[in-house]
Image (tube, helix red, strand yellow):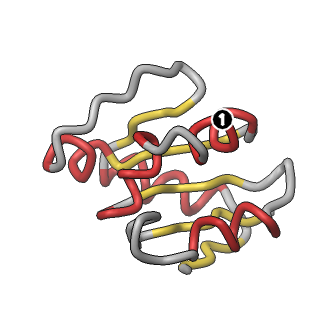
Amino acid sequence: MNLHKITSSPFTHLTLQHCLQRIQPTEGLLLTQDATYAVLDKTLYPKLIDLQSVYVLKEDAEARGIVIESGKIQLITYAQFVELSLEYDNVVSW
C-alpha cells in the first residue's frame, strides 16, 4: 500500500493527473506545497473526492489561503504526515 505525495502545481505540471491514472483504491494521496491548489480545480476536485484517502498538508493549504470544504479531504499537520508515512508501506514522491 503506497502513499503518493504530490508537490507540484496541477496548473503547471501533469504530475497529479499521471498519479490519478495509476493510483489504486487502497492507496493514499497527499497534496503538499503547490499541489494543494488541486482542490480548487473544478476538473480535478471530483476525482480527488472519489478517492478513499486524500490528505492535504494543513500548513501548505493555509499558506496559500486554501480552505478545504469537503470532509473527504483530510487536513493534516507535519506530525500527522510522519505518522501517516509509517502507516503505508511506501511513500512515493512524484
Q: Position of residue 57 (x, y in %)?
A: 35, 49
Vertical side of 29 occupied by 13: above or below: below
Is 76 situated left or right of 85 in this image?
Answer: left
* Amino acid carrying mark 1 in the image: Pro
At x 74%, y 35%, the residue is 50
At x 48%, y 53%, the residue is 83
Vertical side of 51 occupied by 12: above or below: below
Is 81 situated left or right of 20 in this image?
Answer: left
At x 68%, y 60%, the residue is 88
Vertical side of 80 occupied by 7: above or below: below
Q: Position of residue 24 (x, y in %)?
A: 85, 58
Is 32 situated left or right of 15 in this image?
Answer: left
Q: Of helix, strand and loop, which one carries label 1?
A: helix
Assign the N terminus to one quadrant of the image.
bottom right
Assign the C terminus to one quadrant of the image.
bottom right
At x 42%, y 46%, the residue is 56
Judging depth in this view, the residue of 48 and 71 nearest the camera is 48
Q: Is the residue marked by circle 1 packed among few (<14), some (14-19), or many (20+) residues within 10 Å?
A: few
Q: Which residue is mark 1?
A: 46
Is 76 situated left or right of 33 in this image?
Answer: right
Judging depth in this view, the residue of 54 and 1 nearest the camera is 54
Vertical side of 65 occupied by 18: above or below: below
Q: Position of residue 85 (x, y in %)?
A: 55, 62
